[in-house]
């Protein structure tokens, strides 16, 4: 091989013949091609042949050459480091000249080969690549220029850091000025590629771009009125990125940019208008944006409202009329992912916490969960999100003075339905940001929305469901029964709508109202349950998932109110029918199992004989999945991996049963060998399986730990190995389970205390961790104090401040009680170690309300007076530095201020 490599003619002929059959529609031919090509992998210079066919045989059909090129690209991606060096060098040498090929698809295949090759090696190993590509930009051959530009754009996108490396001579110092020169090219494709390439460097802002920033901005501004829509799209995208990354560069020109974006948002090209519309959200999220945008509000707000009207094309695509009986297409049904239990996400139990924060953009981007509209991000959604963002930026009165007149005008019954629909979208968009300013109007607005739930147009009904959900909290807390009752009645009608999009929106909205209304829903339970059962019979597969969620949420919020025979008789039969119909390996069973979890927790013993049926089914599914996983581990080539979601949903169902029937679950645990089964689940490689396993262990530790006692020494090391916040929900549940075990089996846990504490202290000190994990870590540390206060006291100075900060916001309950009792013992064991954090300790103690147990309150008084006595004559000066409000509370409860003061 090497420089003198040449193909064997017979071998070349055979490979070309195989590639020529790749466009055959015959399945047997395709299978033979696949097998024949697999055989070529045994030939050391197979990739040389592919390179030769792609680069040296332009007379072949395009599809044959491209097939060779794509196979080469895939082989590079999969095997490049293992290829002989001579083969690597041959590929590099021969593919680059193909950038001069007259066919664009061939040139672009070269670019992809080059990009994959650099991904598997480095620029340093292909030293002539960048000089050749940059040199190609000066070629008189437009094919070479286009090929070089396209290749460089891919490299700029994937290797921004490497291109600014001093190890390869900082090629950006040459490349960026070259790219800027293409801003004035007469070829719009060249202008577009140059802008795209530079766009990738904006987040990193390398020195070569900073030095040329004035030229860059001048070039961008000169292209704002470019005749090519594709170029204008890139201009808008670049300006949006600069707003987000380096707003300071744009400030001298900001008013001209705003005026351009106002114009571009009206662009006849949809993609240009969408990119321009993104600007308004980006600038609204920058500091001090209010004075910049204030004078433009009277123009901007009506513009955004106009952009929220459906286009004729959107309407045609979305308006499906009465389609409730039309089966869903498989591609319309999202894959199911179980919501593994997270302790601390809800009050009590381990159920259903949300470990993440809210992201407003998800309301607009998740069409299935919140909007039920376009299948992708659109100017309509972008405008609504921008309006939402702006509503938080400006004072309510100032913003509504501009927005409300336009919204009200669009709400008029004389307008076309698509205009009225956009006004309802706008009302939903500004609901959170302008709630205070809108409050005086809502006694009129909400009845209007309730009436509009019955509009003749499905898209109006669906958006009204969403808009009402945005006002759910106000309706429940301020609107009173006169609004809540008609809302529930009308929304239940929409749940049974004959349009699937409306069903979806209504179910999602009702789930939101359930969370806000809580126990206020109890009087409506007969109507709600009857409606849900009717919907169960009516819904297709996609909306059935959303209905399950609404049923689950209802069970969580009304709790034991659901445990009435007449309610059980309404709700359970259709669920049980489906439960019995579905096989253990049917994925349609997964959302049903998840739905049954909170139902079992709510109804409990009211389920009677069904408790054993549900429990045994969950156990059998877990055992079968564990067995299938073992078989897969032994023969992964011949056996499919089992779906871990079956483990998660079954474990969570048992948690729900435990929460519902309490200690009555003891009779089920031992015969089913649950302790041994749970141990296997805790060893799983899958984080969500471990998460649910630890949650179940914690739940069962509360009510029947005696049945798990013999396995605790096997459980604890596994739990300790998961005390790392790289997967927060898993870590959270492991931490909580340790605490539950510790207060019930202290002698077994005691030897592990130093190592557990070693893992928990870094978590406790990282204040960036979310509230749940900080709270559970603090509780467990406190409970470890009940197990071995001396060991915990040795390191009290490392964690006491963070512990107090986490516990001060914890609700007063049994968990907080046990944690403070343990911390009291830790402090008594090492008061000097806690002294410098006394103000934090006092603040945490003062966080208790009237629910504090008398003996714990007495313990606090005792320890605080110990500190006071130890500080002695310096106490008045020391105590005077405490915040005034804190001293008021401490004096009232514990009389810490000297009488003479």
Image: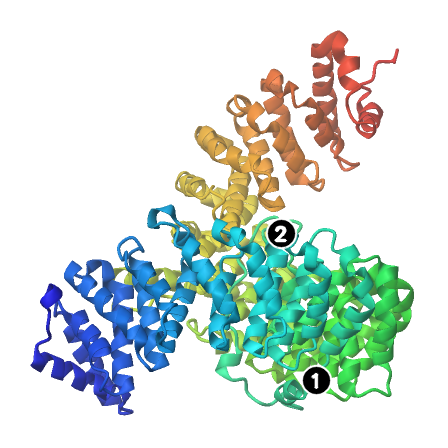
Tell me the element at label 1: loop
- Mark 1 and mark 2: span between their CA atoms? 33 Å
Which residue was labeled with disc 2?
Answer: 345
Q: Residue sitting at 74 percent across and 87 percent down? A: 457
- Of marks 1 and 2, which one's residue comes earlier in the chain? 2
Depth check, front residue: 698 or 101? 101
For the N terminus, the quadrant is: bottom left
Q: Quadrant of residue 135?
A: bottom left
Which residue was labeled with disc 1?
Answer: 497
422 relative to 400 in the view: left or right: left
Q: Nearer the viewer, residue 805 or 736?
A: 805
Q: Residue at x 70, y 31 (%)?
A: 844
Q: Is residue 630 above or below residue 23?
A: above
Please tell me in which quadrant of the rendered image residue 59 appears: bottom left
Label 1 Cα neighbours within 10 Å, binned few <14 / some 14-19 / many ≥20: many
Badge 2: few (under 14), some or many (20 or more) residues near its Cα, within 10 Å? some
Residue shown at 75% from the left, 29% from the top: 854
Q: Is residue 194 left or right of residue 628?
A: right
């Amino acid at each position: 091989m090497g420089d003198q490599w040449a193909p064997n003619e017979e071998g070349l002929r055979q490979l070309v013949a195989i590639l020529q059959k790749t466009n055959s529609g015959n399945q047997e031919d395709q299978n033979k091609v696949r097998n024949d090509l697999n055989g070529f992998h045994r030939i050391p210079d197979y990739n040389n042949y592919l390179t030769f066919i792609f680069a040296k045989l332009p007379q072949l059909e395009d599809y044959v050459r491209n097939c060779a090129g794509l196979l080469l690209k895939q082989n590079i991606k999969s095997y490049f480091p293992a290829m002989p060096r001579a083969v690597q060098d041959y590929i590099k040498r021969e593919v680059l000249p193909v950038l001069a090929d007259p066919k664009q698809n061939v040139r672009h295949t070269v670019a992809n080969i080059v990009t994959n090759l650099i991904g598997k090696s480095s620029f340093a190993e292909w030293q002539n690549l960048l000089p050749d590509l940059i040199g190609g930009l000066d070629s008189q051959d437009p094919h070479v220029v286009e090929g070089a530009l396209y290749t460089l754009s891919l490299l700029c996108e994937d290797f921004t850091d490497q291109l600014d490396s001093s190890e390869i001579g900082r090629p950006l110092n040459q490349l960026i000025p070259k790219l800027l020169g293409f801003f004035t090219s007469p070829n719009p494709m060249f202008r577009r590629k140059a802008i795209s390439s530079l766009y990738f460097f904006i987040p990193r802002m390398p020195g070569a771009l900073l030095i040329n920033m004035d030229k860059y901005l001048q070039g961008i501004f000169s292209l704002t009125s470019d005749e090519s829509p594709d170029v204008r799209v890139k201009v808008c995208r670049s300006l949006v990125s600069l707003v987000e990354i380096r707003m300071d560069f744009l400030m001298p020109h900001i008013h001209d940019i705003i005026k351009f974006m106002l114009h571009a948002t009206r662009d006849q090209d949809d993609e240009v208008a969408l990119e321009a519309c993104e600007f308004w959200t980006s600038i609204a999220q920058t500091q001090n944006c209010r004075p910049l945008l204030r004078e433009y509000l009277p123009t901007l707000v009506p513009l955004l409202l106009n952009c929220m009207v459906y286009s004729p094309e959107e309407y045609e695509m979305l308006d499906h009329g009465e389609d409730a009986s039309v089966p869903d297409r498989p591609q319309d049904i999202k894959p199911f992912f179980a919501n593994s239990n997270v302790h601390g996400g809800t009050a009590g139990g381990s159920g259903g916490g949300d470990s993440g924060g809210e992201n407003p953009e998800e309301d607009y981007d998740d069409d299935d969960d919140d909007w039920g509209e376009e299948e992708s991000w659109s100017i309509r959604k972008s405008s609504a999100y921008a309006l939402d963002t702006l509503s938080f930026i400006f004072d309510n009165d100032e913003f509504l003075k501009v927005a409300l007149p336009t919204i009200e005008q669009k709400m008029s019954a004389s307008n076309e339905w698509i205009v009225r629909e956009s006004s309802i979208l706008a009302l939903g968009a500004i609901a959170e940001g302008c709630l205070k300013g809108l409050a005086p109007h809502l006694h009129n607005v909400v009845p209007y929305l309730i009436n509009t739930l019955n509009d003749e147009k499905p898209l109006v009904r669906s958006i009204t469901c969403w808009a009402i959900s945005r006002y759910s909290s106000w309706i429940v807390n301020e609107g009173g029964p006169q609004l809540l009752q008609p809302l529930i009645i009308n929304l239940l009608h929409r749940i049974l709508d004959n349009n699937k999009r409306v069903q979806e929106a209504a179910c999602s909205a009702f789930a939101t109202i359930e969370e806000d209304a809580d126990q206020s829903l109890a009087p409506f339970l007969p109507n709600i349950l009857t409606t849900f059962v009717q919907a169960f019979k009516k819904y297709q597969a996609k909306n059935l998932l959303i209905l399950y969620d609404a049923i689950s949420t209802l069970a969580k919020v009304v709790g034991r109110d659901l445990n009435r025979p007449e309610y059980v008789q309404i709700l359970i039969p259709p669920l049980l029918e489906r439960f019995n119909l579905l096989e253990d390996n049917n994925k349609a069973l997964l959302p049903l199992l998840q739905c049954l979890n909170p139902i079992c927790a709510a109804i409990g013993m009211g389920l009677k004989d069904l408790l054993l049926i549900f429990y045994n089914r969950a156990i059998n599914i877990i055992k079968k999945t564990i067995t299938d996983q073992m078989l897969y581990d032994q023969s992964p080539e011949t056996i499919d991996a089992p779906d871990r979601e079956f483990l998660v949903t079954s474990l969570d169902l048992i948690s729900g049963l435990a929460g519902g029937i309490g200690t009555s679950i003891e009779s089920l645990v031992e015969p089913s060998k649950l302790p041994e089964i749970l141990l296997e689940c805790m060893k799983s490689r899958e984080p969500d399986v471990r998460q649910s396993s630890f949650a179940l262990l914690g739940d069962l530790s509360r009510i029947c730990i005696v049945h798990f006692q013999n396995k605790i020494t096997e459980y604890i090391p596994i739990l300790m190995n998961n005390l790392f916040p790289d997967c927060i929900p898993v870590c959270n549940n492991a931490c909580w389970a340790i605490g539950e075990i510790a207060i019930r089996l202290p002698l077994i846990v005691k030897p592990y205390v130093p190592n557990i504490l070693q893992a928990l202290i870094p978590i406790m000190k990282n204040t960036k961790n979310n509230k749940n994990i900080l709270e559970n870590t603090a509780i467990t540390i406190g409970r470890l104090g009940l197990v071995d206060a001396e060991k915990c006291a040795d390191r009290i100075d490392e964690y006491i401040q963070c512990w107090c900060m986490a516990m001060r916001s914890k609700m007063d309950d049994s968990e907080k009680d046990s944690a403070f009792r343990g911390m009291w013992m830790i402090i008594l064991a090492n008061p000097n170690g806690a002294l410098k954090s006394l103000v934090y300790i006092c603040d945490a103690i003062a966080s208790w309300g009237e629910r504090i147990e008398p003996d714990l309150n007495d313990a606090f008084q005792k320890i605080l007076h110990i500190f006071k006595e130890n500080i002695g004559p310096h106490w008045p000066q020391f105590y005077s530095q405490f915040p005034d409000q804190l001293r008021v509370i401490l004096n009232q409860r514990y009389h810490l201020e000297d009488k003479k003061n």
